[in-house]
Image (cartoon, rainbow, N blue to C red):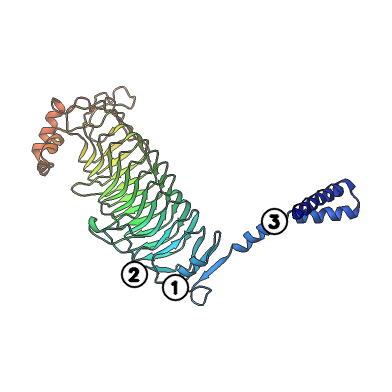
Amino acid sequence: MKWCVIKIFQRLFAITAVIGIVAVGMCPATTEASQRLASIAGIGDVMASQSVSESVRILEVGDQKEYTRIADALSAASDGDTIRIHTGTYREHGLTVDRRVAIFGVGRPVIDVEEKGEGIRITAGNVHIEGLEIRNVPTSHSRDLAAIRFERVSGGKVIGNILDNTFFGIYLARSHDMEIRDNELRAYQTRESVSANGIHLWNSDRAVIKGNVVIGHRDGIYLEYVQESSIHNNHVEKNIRYGLHFMFSDDCIYHDNRFENNGAGVAVMYSRRVIMKHNEFVNNWGAASYGLLLKEITDSEIFENEFSGNTIGIRSEGSDRVKKYRNRFHRNGWAIRIMASSMDNLITENNFIDNAFDVSTNSRQQSRNRFEANYWDKYSGYDLKGDGFGDVPYRPVRLFSLIVERNPMALMLLRSMFVQILDLTERVMPTITPETLVDEKPLMREVRL
């Protein structure tokens, strides 16, 4: 009881002192007292800010530095610290980043995993990794081993790194608002069963994948259950299966990428509202290859892309309400193969130049797919009206292409006199090719792209 009474009197005295200081006004003595009181009141904030500033450190890793092992620096780091890894080879694996740090390589240090496991696993948000080279992540049939893996985080950047001879390169799992930029990823497997993806996103939204070079993986870039992400200015080459692979990923955009000499260029599957523009699909060639595969996608746009030297430029299966416009199809086997399961697509203002087959389909019964105002180099009509459109409709589906759909071996006859006669006969008396696949207003000149 006595202690409680003393405490009450102490508090009353403190309150009285404060009121007295305020009431006295501007006399020098009271001004000094009030300043002292204010400093005492704010001492907690000052101490907190000092604590924060003192905790932000730069940890140096390297020969004759504070730390000789990366793992030791990571263990000693706190939120907000920077870890600088200097030139050298660090034979470490299974590194864990569980604090918000920035990791910078100075002079391109090498982390050699030595086929022993994963490289770096990040479980903290807003981690920045830049300027490293990570090598030799082993193949695994039971674990998704990666050079750099983010697990259930928000925010983070991977910039300017080299990932060489890795299973997975950069792996994002349930991680959002990430930036993957200006990295070089190389792998060397030749079989799909023992390779993995260069940049792999699963259930990760609002990612930016920009300016990367991805070579030699199973899929160069893979997205599954990813929303509102952008893939642009990447060079994706010589990957075993796909350069870019979308699965169940809506409201994404990819643009200004180059997909070259992959097993197949890009596959967009089971997705909605995807925008594909200003990309190059080049030399994706093989028995079952294509520049772009559309499978079960809806309400999307494909425009101002270059399809050149592919077995198939665009293959469309079960894809509805997709607008393809202002694209250039040049020297492909098939420019477009549009299956009867695709409906309500518009193909307009495209250039079709020197393709073996401009358009092919697997059925005469097409469902409201519309070709309008395209340029066809094989069109031999005329424009007496002078309005820039041919006066005679153009039928881009060759009779021989329907024969090849049913019997692929017939392709050996492509350059034969028999096929030329067949095509001429079908132009004069069109009876077999789909009635709906007709361009009623073919352009007389190429579209300027």
Identity of the residue furthest to the left in this view: 418
The earlier-in-sequence mark between 2 and 3 is: 3
The residue at which mark 3 appears reads as: 44
Q: Is the residue marked by circle 3 packed among few (<14), some (14-19), or many (20+) residues within 10 Å?
A: few
Amino acid type assigned to the residue bearing label 1 in the image: Gly
The residue at which mark 1 appears reads as: 88
Residue at (52, 65) in percent of width and height = 83
Vertical comparison of 202 with 133: above or below? above
Amino acid type assigned to the residue bearing label 2 in the image: Glu
Q: Is the residue marked by circle 1 packed among few (<14), some (14-19), or many (20+) residues within 10 Å?
A: some
Q: Which element type, helix, strand or loop, lies under badge 2? A: loop
Amino acid type assigned to the residue bearing label 3 in the image: Gly
The residue at which mark 2 appears reads as: 114
Q: Which element type, helix, strand or loop, lies under badge 1? A: loop
The earlier-in-sequence mark between 2 and 1 is: 1
**Residue 5, position in %: x, y?**
78, 52
**Residue 177, position in %: x, y?**
46, 47
